[in-house]
Each structure stands twice: as structure tokens, then as C-alpha cells.
Image (cartoon, rainbow, N blue to C red):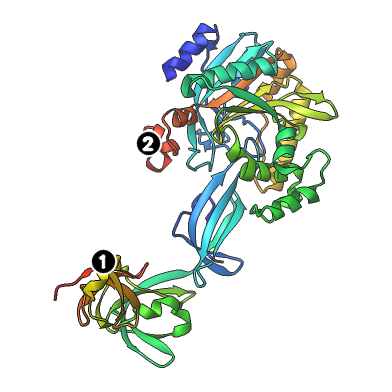
């Protein structure tokens, strides 16, 4: 399937790159913890959680459409669907809009799961459909009451963590398992507060993140963005993420200045997506545990 | 300070303490929607009452490990208010009140080995071995006429007092093997 993936990109004239895994600079995300490595005489280095920053530096240099198939690392993520080391397929397309990127992402996923139809659902619509709540207008209290009424087990600090944490719990507990039962489900236009590295745009009365995720049989497969190219806003989002990290009792991470410099120099308008290769294999082979599609899972690594 | 374990270390069978109560972990599921906060959905069974609850913890949170130990002890004799067990190695004797024994009481028989669960140093629970061999002290003679109606089991009382269903060909005074989890007859035991 690695070969089929490479053929897919060759046919589309997308160039394979191989950005480094290890760096003293980190990708800063409130909810992704990095695995650090020791390099003699240096401050801690981090293994990448995605090749995103390196690839965007190349994009800013004007390299054009690129892809990378890479092992990536995330601390403390172990379950039937998670392995701390896994394979990510990530690619970037110049001048694509989000809908074009969604379409190409679906075509790639079809290499593994067959020619399934897909539908795009709006984040706001799916929350409304499944819970009857318009998240934009609802208060935190209303969301919390919904969680209690539906016997969703919650953790004690959730109310202090705000709306996104409440939405996240509802999505993860109640909605995700129902996504993409007989077709591919593209969940798109996330709340602006969950943009990560996506740009934002107005959608009626709502400012949304130009971000999508693809689900099949309740399994999250892909995360894509219309990429944020504004260096100033990117720096602010890193700072916000670090503030949240500290509030959660985690360490602050060193911001990647080389990456921000590349954005300042100018990242061309582009879309990007990252796909969990091992999860595609799981669905292809109809396996319910990720270790079944790895040479061996983390427990035996 | 009690010992702690993080949500990523906790597996089925772990004994933890939540809100001051001891639980055995049944399952632990890691959930991480999109880019959001990861959490663990943990199912656990109360060590004393057997009640199953589900709790959600943020990933990376730490839970207290309950001070729970198990040891094999031999039943010496029953008293009015409890049962006396002896540690095979130290010959130490303890009395466990019937209140803490619960359903296991029906499987208690002198001179058999049982698994005793200690919580914070005191015995709180008695587990019978999965399979136990006992003599039938009371059962009606097999009535062949009844097999035609499809009824092939009959009630029997074992020497420990447990009431079980046995096949009609088994007689009073015979020794049988029983599954204590379900109370089902397994086989005759040749003596």
C-alpha cells in the first residue's frame, strides 16, 4: 500500500520529500504531547508529531506540491486505534480550495477502502442534528446539562475548560462513533476556536475554521486545512496553545522560529492534509486493533 | 502518599481508589477526538459491592492505587458470626464476618482453599475457587418418566449448603464438580 500511495502522488506530479524527524524546536499544540530525545550538549530535542512545519518551510521556498510518508511520534497515545509511533501521509497542494482538497483526500482514502461515496457535513449542523443544540448560541451550562442528561461520563475540571472541551467530549463520546457508517463522512468547518493551523472564514453568522476531518466507521482518518499563512496570527496561536498547556499542568514548548520565519517570508496559498496510514490499513484489513497492521505494536516494540 | 498510576498505565485488573472507594478496573479506553483534549473512559467494579461504574479522566491524570492484596487461605471452621481462615505459610488465623462474605458463603466448606482479598490490611472479600468438588447431601431419586418432557435437571443441595441443578442420573451421596461463577454442574467426580 506504500507503493500504491506513492503511485497516487506520482500520477499527480506531487514530489516526495523527507523532512527531518528530530529538532530542538517543537510543534506547539495544546493537546499533542511530544516525545523528546537526548542529544549530547543540547537542550532537549523533539521528535515530530507531523512533518508539517518542515514541509511548510519547503513550500515557502517555492518547492510546489509535495508529500511525505513519515513515522511520527506522540507521547502517551496508546489504544486500539493509537500507537505512539505511527505512519502519516501528509501532502500540500498549491491554490487548492478546501473542497478540492477534500475531494483529493477522499480519492486517496478510496485506494484503501474502495469506491465509497462521501458526504460533507458541517460541524455546526451535525451537533445540531445529534443533540438539538446550536453550539454557537448555547451557553456552557446548556452543553454541560446535555452531557449530564445523556449520562456521558465527564471529568471534574471540564467546566473550567470551556466550550471547546465540552463540545469535544460530546463529539468524542456520542457523535464520532456514528460517523461514516456506510459511506465516508467529511466533517468540515470547525469552530474558529478549534482552527489549529487552519485559516478562518465567515460562514453566515459564524466564523469557521477551514478545517476538515474524514471518518469511516467511526474512525478518524484524516485532518486537513486550508493553511494559515499569516505569521503574526500563527505566533499568537502558538502562544495561546502554550497558555492552555500551562493551565493543563503541561510544559511550555519552544516555538519554532524557523517555521515562523518561513511564514513571514511567505507561505503560498495552499491546502494540506495528514492521514493516518495505519488506520487506513486497519479498515482495509477489517482489523479492530492497530497492532494487527503493524509489524508489532508498542507493547512489543 | 498512596502509589499512583497514570491513565495510560492502567489496565484491566488494576485495583484503584476513586473517591475513597476501592475498584477493580474492567476496561480502559483512550479517546481523542480530532485535535481536542484526550480522555480515558474507564469502567470499574466496586471491590466490595460489585457495582459497576464508568468514569472519564483526562489522559495523563493519575489515579491512586488501592492497597489491595490477595492470599490463599484454608478454611478452618465456621463460627456463629464469621468464618475462620488460616494462612498456610504463617499459620496466622483470621475471622471474616459473614457480612463481608456475601454470595460466596454458599460455597464455603471446611478444609478448602479460598482467595482472601485484603484492602488496607483488612480482609474484605472471599473468592471461591472457580471449580469446586462437593458431595450432594440432598436430592430426589432420578425419575426416568420425566425425561420425555425434556426435563433433564433436578434440584440438589450440596454439603456447603449451595443449591444447584444436576442431571437426573446423579444421586445423593455422589461427589460432583461445580462452576462457582454460575452455579452450574460440570461433571461427576470418581472417588
Residue underneath mark 2: A296
In this picture, residue A143 sits left or right of residue A288: right
Estimate how packed mark 1 is, as few (under 14), some (14 to 19) or many (20 or more) residues with alpha carbons within 10 Å.
few
Q: In this figure, what is the number of numbered marks? A: 2
Label 2 with label 1: CB-CB less than 8 Å: no
Measuring from the top left, give residue A256's x and y in whole percent.
66, 27
Measuring from the top left, give residue B126's x and y in whole percent.
40, 76
Measuring from the top left, give residue B48's x and y in whole percent.
50, 72
Q: State whether residue B121 is above or below residue B15.
A: below
Q: Secondary structure at mark 2?
A: loop
Measuring from the top left, give residue B21's x and y in whole percent.
57, 69
Q: Secondary structure at mark 1?
A: helix
Quadrant placement of the C terminus of chain A: top left
The chain that hosts pointer 2 is A
Q: Quadrant of residue A225?
A: top right
Residue underneath mark 1: B148
Amino acid at each position: 500500500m506504500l507503493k500504491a500511495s506513492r503511485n497516487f502522488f506520482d500520477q499527480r506530479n506531487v514530489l516526495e520529500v523527507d523532512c527531518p524527524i528530530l529538532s530542538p524546536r517543537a510543534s506547539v499544540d495544546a493537546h499533542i504531547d511530544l516525545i523528546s530525545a537526548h542529544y549530547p550538549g543540547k537542550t532537549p530535542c523533539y521528535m515530530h508529531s507531523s512533518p508539517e512545519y518542515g514541509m511548510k518551510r519547503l513550500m515557502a521556498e517555492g518547492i510546489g506540491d509535495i508529500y511525505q510518508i513519515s513515522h511520527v511520534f506522540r507521547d502517551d497515545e496508546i489504544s486500539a486505534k493509537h500507537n505512539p509511533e505511527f505512519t502519516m501521509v501528509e501532502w500540500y497542494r498549491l491554490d487548492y480550495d478546501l473542497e478540492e482538497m477534500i475531494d483529493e483526500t477522499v480519492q486517496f482514502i478510496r485506494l484503501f477502502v474502495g469506491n465509497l461515496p462521501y458526504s460533507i457535513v458541517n460541524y455546526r449542523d451535525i451537533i445540531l442534528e445529534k443533540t438539538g443544540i446550536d453550539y454557537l448560541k448555547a451557553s456552557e451550562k446548556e452543553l454541560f446539562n446535555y452531557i449530564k442528561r445523556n449520562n456521558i461520563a465527564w471529568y471534574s475540571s471540564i467546566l473550567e475548560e470551556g466550550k471547546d472541551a465540552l463540545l469535544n467530549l460530546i463529539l468524542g463520546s456520542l457523535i464520532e462513533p456514528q460517523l461514516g457508517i456506510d459511506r465516508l463522512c467529511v466533517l468540515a468547518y470547525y469552530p474558529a476556536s478549534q482552527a489549529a493551523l487552519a485559516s478562518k472564514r465567515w460562514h453566515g453568522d459564524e466564523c469557521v475554521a477551514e478545517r476538515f476531518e474524514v471518518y469511516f466507521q467511526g474512525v478518524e482518518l484524516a485532518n486537513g486545512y486550508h493553511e494559515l499563512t499569516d505569521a503574526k496570527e500563527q505566533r499568537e496561536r502558538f502562544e495561546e496553545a502554550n497558555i492552555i498547556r500551562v493551565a493543563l499542568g503541561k510544559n511550555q514548548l519552544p516555538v519554532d522560529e524557523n517555521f515562523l520565519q518561513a511564514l513571514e517570508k511567505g507561505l503560498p496559498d495552499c491546502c494540506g492534509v495528514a492521514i493516518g496510514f495505519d488506520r487506513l490499513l486497519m479498515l482495509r484489513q477489517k482489523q479492530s486493533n492497530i497492532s494487527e497492521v503493524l509489524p508489532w505494536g508498542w507493547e512489543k516494540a | 502518599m498512596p502509589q499512583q498510576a497514570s491513565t495510560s498505565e492502567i489496565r484491566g485488573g488494576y485495583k484503584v481508589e476513586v473517591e475513597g472507594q476501592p475498584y477493580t478496573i474492567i476496561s480502559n479506553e483512550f479517546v481523542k477526538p480530532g485535535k481536542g483534549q484526550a480522555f480515558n473512559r474507564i469502567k470499574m467494579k466496586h471491590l466490595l459491592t460489585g457495582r459497576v461504574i464508568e468514569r472519564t479522566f483526562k489522559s495523563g491524570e493519575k489515579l491512586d492505587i488501592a492497597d489491595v492484596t490477595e492470599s490463599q487461605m484454608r478454611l478452618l471452621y465456621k463460627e456463629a458470626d464469621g468464618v475462620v481462615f488460616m494462612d498456610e505459610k504463617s499459620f496466622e488465623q483470621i475471622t471474616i464476618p459473614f457480612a463481608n462474605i456475601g454470595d460466596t458463603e454458599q460455597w464455603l466448606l471446611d478444609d478448602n482453599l479460598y482467595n482472601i482479598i485484603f484492602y488496607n490490611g483488612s480482609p474484605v472479600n472471599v473468592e471461591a475457587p472457580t471449580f469446586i468438588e462437593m458431595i450432594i447431601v440432598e436430592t430426589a431419586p432420578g425419575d426416568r418418566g420425566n425425561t420425555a418432557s425434556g426435563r433433564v435437571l433436578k434440584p440438589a443441595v450440596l454439603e456447603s449448603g449451595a443449591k444447584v441443578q444436576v442431571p437426573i442420573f446423579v444421586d445423593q451421596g455422589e461427589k460432583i464438580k461445580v462452576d462457582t461463577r454460575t452455579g452450574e454442574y460440570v461433571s461427576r467426580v470418581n472417588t
